[in-house]
Amino acid sequence: MRGRERINQNTIDGLKKMLFDEYKEGREVCGWALCRISIGRDGVDIINNWKLTPHLINSFLKYSEGFKDEEAEFLIYLLETFARQLE
């Protein structure tokens, strides 16, 4: 069974919290995970069906305001996820 098939409410709740984690490293891990999930069309469907996009947008807006270099990796992960949603 692929990892995407194991995603449940607990996973989604954790990702939503991690998008706003006070520690940059936590946000980066979350961004990386969402980026990896979004690689396949089924992963994009998961993000859309669980209504994660508004959380992604809010997190992007929060951490891109007054941009700091150390936020770049996290923001790039989110941008890649957005791009895959639009494909």
Image (tube, rainbow, N blue to C red):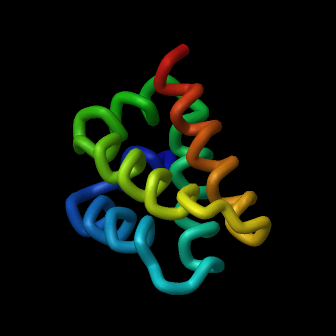
User: Residue farthest to the top?
Assistant: 87
Residue drawn at x 30%, y 59% is 12
Q: Is residue 66 above or below residue 1?
A: below
Tally of marks: 0
Q: With 75 as the anchor, is 3 left or right in this view? A: left
- Residue 9 in the image, given as x and y percentages of width and height: 21, 60
Quarter of the C terminus within the rendering: top right
Question: Residue most toward the right?
Answer: 69
Residue 34 at x, y percent in the picture: 52, 50
- Which residue sits at x=35%, y=29%? 45
Counting from the top left corner in percent of width and height, residue 27 is at 55, 70
Identify which residue is drawn at 71% across, 67% down: 68
Q: Nearer the viewer, residue 18 or 8?
A: 18
59 versus 56 height, above or below: below
- Image side of residue 54 versus residue 56, left or right: left
* Quarter-of-image position of residue 23: bottom right
Residue 13 sits in quarter: bottom left
Q: Residue at x 63, y 53 (%)?
A: 75
- The residue most toward the bottom is 23
Is residue 30 placed above or below 37 in the rendered structure? below
Front position in the image: 75 or 31: 75
Residue placed most toward the observer, 68 or 42 = 68
